């Protein structure tokens, strides 16, 4: 047999090549942009700028890992693995550099916590490679790490000297334990999503949840004022590098014209799609038709927002003057939009390639065993978190448990995962029902990070 | 036969259910969540609740006790129910676990083995010393094999880690101990506050509770000195207080406490919680320059002298003259046409100096922040001030605010916590492994060795371990002589 036959590249291979090329081009562009930025500022030692490189690496790796999950071609995942290693090396160096620069461990401000949390997630992902394939956990674990690094770009990075209550060895112990515990929760979350896929989660269910959540997020922008067609961004003072406060509780806000209507339109489109999904079988077909338009609308919204922020000054009614805004103005809103966009993309890919994706996933009981093992480790860390927190609070403030929101949020997280561990003892509650707890548990982790610090105030607030 | 349980039996059965545990944990999580997002009364500042919530909302939430979730009766009931549930579940399941320890299953038969995942069958030649080989393999792997004679020969049994079956019960008992510690602290523990100025001593503390009360202590605490260390940018770096414990009139302990380093004496803990200026000056540094009465200051002004003195202390200027700082106000302002004390920090001080010459006295007022304002002559019968006073420095007396805590349940909480973590580690990482070896007859009438294993956790790593042991056993038996065509079945 000496014949050589020309084999036409399969669709999967073409998709893979396309994605690899696109990711490479975008990565190079962003890297060049960051290098230029550092050059212009003459600032080669800024931790924030180095974390931008890390963000590009993790985001690119995430996209590639998802490509492998969707197409079945292994090359993107191999590239993703190397990118993750490279990103992790830079990340670890940046972390050490920040420690040295600040003279204290990066355990205090929100910027530092996000940087450390992302490091923990990727560390655990890489360490688990001995018994858990990188390709399996990476598609959902890497985006979490990337989002955390994105937040470091949007929050103030100045190091502030430790207040007296934080000057203790317990700072090292308590926060290290927290980061490892929450990192394990993130890893379990990634596997839990895969479990749902393998267990027969319908793509329409995923799409319904995504559109419903998306509609809520878009409607809630700028304190639900988009429902009136008004979108406001807090003014940003570039000289002090902070938002502008008119009073203790009142921020100076600028009104961005047109964006309110764009966001409202996107919210309504998402809501319409959501209703079509949940109404019944007949309307589901229409929902599937509408879904790509919601994705397009989101991309338009995000692009419009980015353009608007860079474009110039806006009128602030409170002081009847024009003010500047920045990406730092409303970091959580921006991140929320990115999350919804990512989820929508994921939902579309899932709908297109559901059977193939599910066939390639590990067996259900393997996923279940892996999730249980990771949650077991997480629970040990979460228990240690509560205990070290109590001991430290006792030494610093004189009481080991004060029902402080941060303490209670950590307890909520612990309770949810503790409930999960017991579910396999109840007939009929193994499997899917148990995995829901893992998902909700990670939402509790997000609430502990973000909800407590920014929705409430307390002794535990990371930012003032 | 109809299963008619008494109400009590049904209650016990319900309390022993893990399903109930999960439901209770979910309810607990919801209650905790409500207590987080709804501003709680003990953490709210005065009037903050009214500002945050509309009156109807307040009435509604208050009706359900949602403004003080963690001290409400239903929350306590939930915790009690959870504690009972933990206790009953443990009691219910403990006997089965204990059986593993006191009556290990040393005999295995075909029925039992058919339920196991890890089974190897090795065909033997009649003369194989299988028992010896099996025992050696197991012993080398670190187990202690025991042989039990059976009707058809013998069954070899080995196990390790049986004690790990106790781990879940140890964990749950430790959780109950923690709850008990918290309960004891809730009933018998208290928190208080003690404020001391430098040099002040007190044996009474103010207990924080719904109605604040004063509690006398069997000893007294004196604050000898207290201060704050600042960072270069002016923010506080550390607060410290030198405390002395006085019991029966004698000094029995002393410590410099800081934030994160409390004083512990007789089960009471004193924490650096608060710090500030009392508004009283401890020490003043003044420069006093003589000026000729009525004469303009010449180039040869008489030399000025600097004095450091305490308020009220008389200092001699010359044989006839002396002065004291009679009054010192650290920070005054004029508001609404009246003089007010703005703060206890020396930001805008005012002094009343009394100058005494022989029998005559004169009040002099100076305002250091307004140096151009000439010293005001006040009441007195001296013609004019012969001296010019300038405030160079003032050392304020500070007070320290100590948080006092009595937590009798602390020991239980500490031990419970340690045991929970150790128990969790054991429970998740160590498994109970068991092995059985015996002879059976194959269909062909030939003997075959059955090697079976079971682990209650970590099936993947146990599978590898079991396969390795099977291989070792096979090799050893081969050396002793297996049938030529023998294969591991």
Image: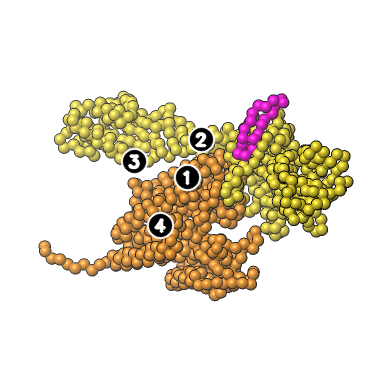
How far apart are the two marked residues, 2 and 4, measured between alpha carbons?
38 Å
Chain letter for the part of the structure drawn in yellow:
B
How far apart are the two marked residues, 1 and 3, measured between alpha carbons?
29 Å
Report the residue that reaches farthest toward the left.
Answer: A1
Q: Are marks 2 and 1 on the same chain?
A: no
Looking at the rendered structure, the secondary structure element under dot 1 is helix
Chain letter for the part of the structure drawn in orange:
A
Where is residue B349 drawn, in percent x and y? Answer: 74, 50
Q: Are marks 1 and 3 on the same chain?
A: no
Where is residue B341 drawn, in percent x and y? Answer: 77, 51
Looking at the rendered structure, the secondary structure element under dot 3 is helix
State left or right for residue B40 relative to residue A380.
Answer: right
How far apart are the two marked residues, 4 and 1, measured between alpha carbons?
21 Å
Residue B418, disc: 2
Subunit that carries the residue with mark 4:
A
Residue B461, disc: 3
* Location of mark 4 (residue): A54
Subunit that carries the residue with mark 2:
B
State left or right for residue B299 relative to residue B361.
Answer: left
Q: Range of the magenta residues?
A: B240-258
Choose mark 2 or mark 3, whichever is in front: 2
């Amino acid at each position: 047999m000496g014949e050589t036959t020309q084999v036409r590249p399969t669709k999967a291979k073409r998709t893979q090549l396309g994605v690899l090329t696109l990711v490479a081009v975008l990565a190079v562009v962003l890297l060049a942009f960051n290098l230029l930025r550092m050059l212009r500022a003459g600032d080669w030692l800024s931790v924030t700028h180095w974390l931008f490189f890390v963000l590009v690496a993790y985001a690119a790796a995430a996209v590639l890992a998802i490509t492998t999950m969707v197409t079945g071609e292994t090359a993107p995942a191999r590239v993703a693995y190397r990118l993750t290693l490279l990103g992790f090396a830079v990340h670890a160096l940046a972390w050490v550099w920040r420690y040295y620069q600040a003279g204290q461990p990066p355990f205090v401000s929100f910027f530092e916590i996000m940087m450390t949390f992302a490091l923990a997630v990727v560390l655990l992902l890489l360490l688990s490679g001995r018994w858990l394939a990188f390709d399996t956990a990476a598609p959902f674990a890497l985006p979490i790490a990337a989002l955390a690094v994105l937040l470091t770009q949007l929050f103030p990075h100045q190091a502030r000297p430790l207040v007296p209550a934080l000057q203790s060895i317990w700072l090292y112990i308590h926060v290290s334990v927290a980061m490892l515990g929450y990192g394990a929760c993130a890893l379990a979350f990634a596997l839990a999503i895969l479990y749902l896929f393998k267990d027969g989660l319908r793509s329409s269910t995923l799409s319904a949840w995504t559109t419903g959540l998306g509609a809520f997020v878009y409607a809630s922008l700028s304190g639900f004022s988009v429902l009136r067609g008004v979108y406001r961004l807090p003014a940003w003072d570039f000289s002090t590098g902070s938002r502008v406060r008119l009073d203790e509780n009142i921020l100076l806000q600028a009104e961005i014209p047109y964006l309110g209507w764009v966001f409202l339109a996107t919210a309504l489109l998402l809501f319409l799609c959501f209703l079509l999904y949940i109404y019944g079988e007949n309307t589901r077909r229409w929902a599937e038709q509408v879904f790509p338009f919601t994705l397009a609308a989101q991309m338009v919204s995000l692009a419009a927002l980015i353009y608007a922020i860079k474009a110039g000054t806006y009128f602030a009614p409170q002081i009847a003057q024009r003010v500047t805004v920045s990406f730092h103005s409303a970091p959580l809103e921006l991140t929320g939009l990115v999350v919804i966009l990512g989820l929508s993309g994921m939902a579309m890919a899932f709908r297109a390639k559901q059977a193939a994706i599910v066939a390639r996933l590990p067996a259900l009981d393997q996923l279940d065993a892996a999730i249980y093992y990771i949650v077991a480790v997480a629970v040990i860390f979460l228990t240690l978190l509560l205990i070290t927190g109590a001991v430290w609070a006792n030494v610093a403030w004189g009481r080991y448990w004060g029902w402080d929101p941060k303490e209670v949020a950590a307890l909520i997280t612990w309770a949810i995962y503790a409930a999960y561990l017991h579910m396999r003892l109840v007939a009929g509650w193994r499997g899917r029902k148990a995995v829901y707890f893992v998902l909700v548990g990670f939402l509790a982790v997000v609430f502990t990070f973000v909800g407590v610090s920014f929705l409430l105030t307390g002794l535990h607030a990371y930012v003032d | 036969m109809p299963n008619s349980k008494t109400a009590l039996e049904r209650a016990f059965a319900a309390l022993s259910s893990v399903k109930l545990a999960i439901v209770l944990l979910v309810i607990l999580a919801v209650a905790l969540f409500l207590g987080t997002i709804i501003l709680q009364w003990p953490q709210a500042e005065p009037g903050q609740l009214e500002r945050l919530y509309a009156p109807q909302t307040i009435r509604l939430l208050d009706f359900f006790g949602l403004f003080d979730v963690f001290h409400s009766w239903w929350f306590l009931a939930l915790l009690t129910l959870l504690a009972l549930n933990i206790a009953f579940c443990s009691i219910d399941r403990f006997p089965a676990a204990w059986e593993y320890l006191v009556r290990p299953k040393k005999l295995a038969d075909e029925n039992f083995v058919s339920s196991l995942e890890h089974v190897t069958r090795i065909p033997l030649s009649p003369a194989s010393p299988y028992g010896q080989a099996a025992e050696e393999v197991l012993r080398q792997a670190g187990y202690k094999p025991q042989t039990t004679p059976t009707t058809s020969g013998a069954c070899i049994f080995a196990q390790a880690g049986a004690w790990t079956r106790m781990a879940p019960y140890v964990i749950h008992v430790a959780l109950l101990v923690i709850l008990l510690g918290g309960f004891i602290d809730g009933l018998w523990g208290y928190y208080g506050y003690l404020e001391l100025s430098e040099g002040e001593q007190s044996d009474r503390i103010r207990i924080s509770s719904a109605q604040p009360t004063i509690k006398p202590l069997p000893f007294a605490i004196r604050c000898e000195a207290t201060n704050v260390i600042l960072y270069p940018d002016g923010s506080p770096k550390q607060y410290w207080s030198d405390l002395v414990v006085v019991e029966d009139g004698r000094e029995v302990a002393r410590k410099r406490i800081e934030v994160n380093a409390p004083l512990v004496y007789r089960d009471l803990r004193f924490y650096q919680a608060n710090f500030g200026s009392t508004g009283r000056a401890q020490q003043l540094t003044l420069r006093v320059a003589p000026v000729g009465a009525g004469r303009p200051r010449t180039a040869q002004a008489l030399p000025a002298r600097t004095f450091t003195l305490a308020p009220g202390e008389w200092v001699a200027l010359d044989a006839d003259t002396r002065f004291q700082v009679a009054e010192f106000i650290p920070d005054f302002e004029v508001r609404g046409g009246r003089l007010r004390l703005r703060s206890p920090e020396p930001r805008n001080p005012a002094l009343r100096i009394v100058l005494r010459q022989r029998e005559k006295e004169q009040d002099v007022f100076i305002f250091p922040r307004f140096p151009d304002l000439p010293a005001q002559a006040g009441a007195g019968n001296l013609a004019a001030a012969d001296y010019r006073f300038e405030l160079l420095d003032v050392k304020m007396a500070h007070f320290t605010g100590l948080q006092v805590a009595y937590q009798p349940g602390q020991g239980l909480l500490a031990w419970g916590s340690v045991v929970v973590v150790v128990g969790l580690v054991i429970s998740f990482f160590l498994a109970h492994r068991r092995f059985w070896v015996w002879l059976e007859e194959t269909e062909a009438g030939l003997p075959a060795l059955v090697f079976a294993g079971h682990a209650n956790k970590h099936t993947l790593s146990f599978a590898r371990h079991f396969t390795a042991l099977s291989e070792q056993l096979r090799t050893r038996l081969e050396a002793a002589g297996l049938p030529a065509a023998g294969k591991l079945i």
